[in-house]
Amino acid sequence: MTASATTPQVRHVSLAAPFQDQKPGTSGLRRPTPVFQQPHYLESFLEAVLQTLPGVQGGTLVVGGDGRYGNRRAIDVILRMACAHRVGRVITTTNGILSTPAASHLIRTSPGCVGGIILSASHNPGGPEEDFGVKVNGANGGPAPEQLSNAIHQATLTLQGYAVVETAAIPLDRPGHHRLGTTVVEVVDGVEDFVVLMQKLFDFDQLREFLGSGFPITFDALHAVTGPYARRIFEDLLGLPAGTVRHGAPLEDFGGGHPDPNLTYAKPLADALLQGDEFSFGAACDGDGDRNMILGRRCFVNPSDSLAVITAHATQVKGYGQGLAGVARSMPTSAAVDAVAETLAIPCYETPTGWKFFGTLLDAGKITLCGEESFGTGSDHVREKDGLWAVLFWLSILATERCSVATLMERHWATYGRHYYSRHDYEEVEQTAAAELYGTLQRQLPRLAGQPLAGDRIRQADEFSYTDPVDGSTSSRQGLRILLESGSRMIFRLSGTGTRGATLRLYLERYEPNNGALNLDPQTALAPLIRGADQLAGIRQHTGMSTPTVIT
Ligand code: VG1
Ligand code: CO
């Protein structure tokens, strides 16, 4: 153990004025890096966290990040502020590399842990001119619930200053124990515990045999946090050839790319699977490792369908053989999983967008699996969505089914019918234009029921509100829903993770029964709804954009 020569002196730094813009969004506080580099900006938010999170003094905190620009500096600041706040122990990782699901696991398994701070802006690009972010997790390992985020935000609004110590940086290049005043800093390997958890949930012998039997796969880490985890799992433990993991070295700017696993931003991978024949399976994760994209040869798996398939096949997978307590999906996610839950006769919950809303259901044992249309899937093994877990789950299903991804999907739709689904994003829309579009539609809602739309009729139009079935807390204003008589729907939401202008998300869904047309291109199947959404909300007129910036 290294100890700082003298107990560091606590310095109280005054703020000229409290920051007024530190309200966390859907998942933590995300801002362009230059905003975080303003003097005292990061420290102000951290002070609010350390004052608000219960049990900080004398407790244990987990700290790490996705390796983006600013990660190392932020960890240094957190360690010095943790010392000033008399945190008992801070667990951080070699080079500060820690995926969001691995952080969740570490929080849950570290005795006395009161929560964690994850440095990531997730799928947003990184670098000096791109984005940085701070996510705060609670003692259950999950994202801070709304009440905690609101309390942190409230604290920032009146903050007079913050406490910090000055000391030499703690070396993070290798595991070790250090002492900063009364705070113990433990540097651990951020990969191993997570990999052990995966070995408990999935049958690695079966996977090794299956993947070695002529089922070539490729994984794209997009130069983000999952590289070291994926290399350890796929190349070391499952024995796949070196190079199976592409872009496996975490880089501060993700190699200039956008670490978002979708068809737009993971295009080289998508091309390899959708146009080439080299691989039977491909997958990618996002910046902080909680999202996943699943591809088969000539087959893209929609994330809503992915949750449904995982649910339908769960009992074939080692860690889930006991069956499922229930499932949950976010409101805009398609109802594909609902159909499976009905067949399995298990409860299916509908929550607002954001993983934090699954926390109480998972903690109460009401659900085993959950997911979001935004490439997020997870289970009760941690309290975050988990990208590599989803990839291993899919491979485990394929190892028992012994068929192609495309065949698995065809069989699924032939059983349950198909929920055609797509999300259209309009990014960097001018704030006022987006607010006007949204507000105009919101005001129309009470008059819409019974109106014709998209060759169908509106059954119900409202703004989604949620009452948590476990703790009774309510969350309102969670998206505008237009539900049609046929069961089709369109949802309008404004993103809570963007950092430039506003992002309008339009979610479209249409159900086709299992004796119907199951092999249409989703954009074709949804074309009437797409036109109807524009007619209803005047998307082109308000945004001046004729097409979405991203279609998933
Ligand atoms: C988006 C997704 C949401 C997800 C959130 C955080 O939020 O839609 O489903 O939970 O990102 O994911 P929004 O408000 O922009 O729609 V991550 O991987 O960025 O933590
Ligand atoms: Co993420």
Image: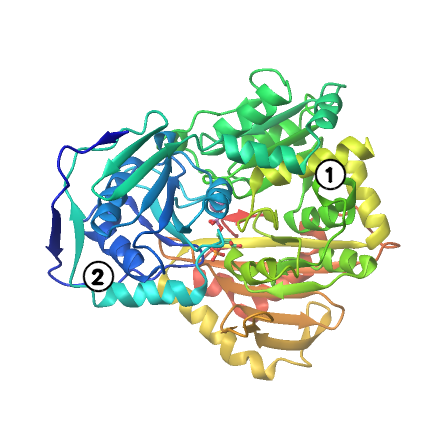
Q: Amino acid at mark 1?
A: Lys
Identify the residue position indicated by label 2 in the image: 19
* 163 sits left or right of 291 in the view: left
Q: Nearer the viewer, mark 2 or mark 1?
A: 1
Ligand 1 neighbours mark 2 (CB distance < 8 Å): no
Identify the residue position indicated by label 1 in the image: 318
Q: Position of residue 217 (x, y in %)?
A: 66, 25
The answer to whether one can see residue 260 in this image is yes
Task: Please tell me which residue lies in front, 456 or 307.
Answer: 307
Q: Is residue 546 above or below residue 467?
A: above
- Secondary structure beneath label 1: helix
* Quarter that holds the N terminus: top left
The answer to whether one can see residue 464 in this image is no
Q: Is residue 480 above or below residue 195?
A: below
Total numbered labels placed on residues in the image: 2
Is tag 2's residue or tag 1's residue first in the polypeptide sequence?
2
Quadrant for residue 277, please give it.
top right
Tell which residue pokes out farthest to the right in this image. 515
**Number of other residues with Cα within 10 Å of mark 1, as a class: few under 14, some 14 to 19, many 20 or more:** some
Task: Please tell me which residue lies in front, 376 or 51.
Answer: 51
**Number of other residues with Cα within 10 Å of mark 2, as a class: few under 14, some 14 to 19, many 20 or more:** some
- Secondary structure beneath label 2: loop
Q: Residue at x 53, y 49 (%)?
A: 384
* 249 sits left or right of 310 in the view: left
Q: Residue at x 58, y 28 (%)?
A: 219
Q: Amino acid at mark 2?
A: Phe
Q: Position of residue 18 (x, y in %)?
A: 18, 63
